[in-house]
Image (tube, rainbow, N blue to C red):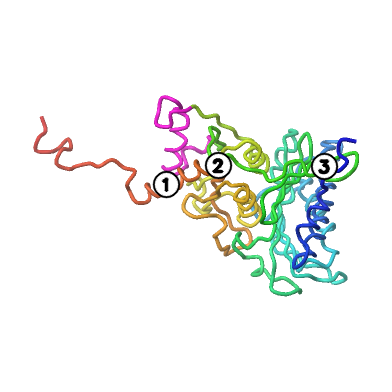
């Protein structure tokens, strides 16, 4: 057996959570069990019977798919009973989920997006689950305010990607590591230890159909990338867009790149599109632990203190050199230094007009 001797996810989390956070190891094993359930469900496609909408609009104003609802239930049921949690918060729920009375309470908080990119499930494109673990001061019943912590206080973050193979990518604050599900044995096996995002890249991911709504710094960046060798970048770039954050971030972790879901003017009431707690913060932690960067363009994502459970933010993450360039372009735009100097004396209506 080629898998004999490989480190399993269970062994990895137990070894790396001994001591102060030993109970978190048990919680992560429950999360992995939920991921296996969702993987089996997603893998059946239309045969699962859960394709299509659920005729429900969630708190985001979006139509829930049946598979969103079932995936959400899978995580709740797998994780509510173990005694490690004070509460859970899901992108699919308006309010935090309280631990049922019959189960003991712990001090950890589980935050998750049960099926990111679920709109792609109907067309057999990779989707995923994103999760994050926070901590409150003491065991008990969690309040909404307990979840409103900046991302730098996350104890663990990860995602599962359901593609040709199912992988679980995890950080406990000491690097980013990838585990692949051995479907025959039923174990997640460590296959990608200590993942590193290349500092430079020639690949970017953005939804170009929204270009007319972007801020000038993002328009400038994408324009330069498109111009390729003939322009200031001096290199040709490839553009990607899958419309599944898990799939986009996974590609970046495997081979580098930058993912952009920037601030835009399409809906002035939303400062960004992605949810801070359920998507941006967990992915930012994974990317930073792999040597990359995650920013709004004006602020490090992990430094943002949430003021609402379903708060949205702009997201720019991936290879360090490209995120730093985008931050510089935002700074130059905000300070006006990106605009060429114009002297009123030599404009068209000046004294020197011919």
Indicate which disc, 2 or 3, sits on the residue closer to the N terminus.
3
Q: Where is residue 170 in the image (x, y as percent from the top left)?
A: 72, 50
Q: What element carries label 1?
A: helix
C-alpha separation, residue under disc 3 versus residue under disc 1? 40 Å
Residue that badge 3 annotates: 181
Residue reaching furthest to the front: 5
- Label 2 packing within 10 angstroms: few (<14), some (14-19), many (20+): many
Q: Position of residue 133 (x, y in %)?
A: 71, 60
Indicate which disc, 3 or 1, sits on the residue closer to the N terminus.
3
C-alpha separation, residue under disc 2 versus residue under disc 3? 27 Å
Residue at 45%, 43% (x, y): give it: 325
Main structural element of the magenta stretch: helix, strand or loop?
helix
Q: Which mark is residue 319?
A: 2
Quarter of the C terminus within the rendering: top left
In-image side of 149 versus 109 (left or right)? left
Indicate which disc, 1 or 2, sits on the residue closer to the N terminus.
2
Residue that badge 1 annotates: 328
- Label 3 packing within 10 angstroms: few (<14), some (14-19), many (20+): many
């Amino acid at each position: 057996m080629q898998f004999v001797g490989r480190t399993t996810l269970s062994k990895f989390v137990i070894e790396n959570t001994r001591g102060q956070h030993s109970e978190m190891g048990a919680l992560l094993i429950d999360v992995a069990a939920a991921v296996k359930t969702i993987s089996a469900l997603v893998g059946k496609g239309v045969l699962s019977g859960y394709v299509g909408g659920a005729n429900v609009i969630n708190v985001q104003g979006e139509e829930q798919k049946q598979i969103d609802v079932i995936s959400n239930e899978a995580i709740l049921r797998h994780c509510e009973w173990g005694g490690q949690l004070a509460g859970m918060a899901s992108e699919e729920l308006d309010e935090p989920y309280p631990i049922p009375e019959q189960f003991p309470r712990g001090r950890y908080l589980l935050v998750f997006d049960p099926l990111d990119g679920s709109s792609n499930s109907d067309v057999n494109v990779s989707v995923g689950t994103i999760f994050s673990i926070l901590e409150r001061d003491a065991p008990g019943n969690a309040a909404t305010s307990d979840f409103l912590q900046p991302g730098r206080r996350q104890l663990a973050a990860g995602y599962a990607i359901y593609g040709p193979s199912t992988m679980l990518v995890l950080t406990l604050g000491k690097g980013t590591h990838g585990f692949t599900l051995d479907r025959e044995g039923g174990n997640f096996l460590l296959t990608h230890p200590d993942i590193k995002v290349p500092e430079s890249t020639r690949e970017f991911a953005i939804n170009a159909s929204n270009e007319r709504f972007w801020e000038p710094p993002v328009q400038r960046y994408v324009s330069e990338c498109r111009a390729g060798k003939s322009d200031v970048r001096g290199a040709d770039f490839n553009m990607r867009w899958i419309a599944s954050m898990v799939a986009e971030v996974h590609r970046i972790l495997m081979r580098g790149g930058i993912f952009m879901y920037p601030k835009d003017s399409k809906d002035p009431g939303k400062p960004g599109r992605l949810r801070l707690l359920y998507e941006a913060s967990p992915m930012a932690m994974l990317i930073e632990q792999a040597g990359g960067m995650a920013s709004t363009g004006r602020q490090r994502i992990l430094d943002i203190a949430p003021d609402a459970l379903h708060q949205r933010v702009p997201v720019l993450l991936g290879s360090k050199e490209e995120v730093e360039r985008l931050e510089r372009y935002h700074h130059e735009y905000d300070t006006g230094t990106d605009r060429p100097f114009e002297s009123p004396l030599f404009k068209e209506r000046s004294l020197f007009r011919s």
